[in-house]
Amino acid sequence: AIVGRDDRAASLLFDILFGEAAPVTGEVKWGTTITPSYFPKENNSFFTSGELNLVDWLRQYSEEKDESFIRGFLGRMLFSGEESQKKSNVLSGGEKVRCMLSKMMLQGGNVQVLDDPTNHLDLESITALNNALRDYPGSLLFASHDLQFIDTVANRIIELTPDGIIDRRMNYEEYLADETLKTQRQKMYKLA
């Protein structure tokens, strides 16, 4: 989990990783065996083709164009029957999140990057996402305001501070309780 007092830092990091923003210095290169998938915090730009129904919306991200194949991915996110014919420009925030998760599943990446994926989701959807990500065999990078979500999914915490990063392999509850890390965080925020 990427954490910090300014969540814009995590969003910018993720945008840099996916070429949505340029780094001030250096460059980003994914390994040759990496297939990354990105869930940006701001996803409205993916839903500007208002005339597309959800099947056609998701089809544009798939090499396989068969409707039953596409409907299978929508069905996993509870878009079944007539729901899959809904126009993409009338979706609620939670429906957009579910569509973006369908898109990520369809892409089959082995590295998932999620920027506040629990925004707009109800408790049942958050629980399902939490369980799926805990069982996910690939690598995850994510930021979230949901402390329980961070604690149950992450096994490594990277905190972005104004004076550098703190990187520890532990769950979030342990990270917050560690007195040495509390002192280090205080110093790193004061120096900026």
Image: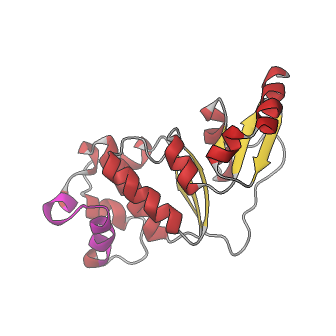
Position in image of residue 158 (x %, y %): 72, 46
Q: Residue at x 70, y 53 (%)?
A: 170
Q: Is residue 39 left or right of residue 72?
A: right
Any part of residue 1 in sight: no
Q: Residue at x 49, y 41 (%)?
A: 146
Of residues 153 and 20, which is closer to you in this image? Answer: 153
Picture quadrant of residue 122: top left
* Magenta-colored span: 69-84
Position in image of residue 117 (x %, y %): 47, 48
Magenta: main secondary structure equals: helix
Position in image of residue 52 (x %, y %): 27, 55
Of residues 186 and 7, which is closer to you in this image? Answer: 186
- Residue at the outermost left position: 82
Q: Residue at x 28, y 50 (%)?
A: 88
- Dividing the image into 4 quarters, which one contains the C terminus? top right
Position in image of residue 16 (x %, y %): 68, 47
73 to 21, vertically: above or below: below
Q: Residue at x 78, y 48 (%)?
A: 167
In reply to whether residue 80 is colored magenta, the answer given is: yes
Any part of residue 177 in sight: yes
Of residues 145 and 61, which is closer to you in this image? Answer: 145
Which color mode does the image show?
A: secondary structure
In reply to whether residue 52 is colored magenta, the answer given is: no
Q: Is residue 108 left or right of residue 69?
A: right
158 to 79, vertically: above or below: above
Q: How many marks?
A: 0
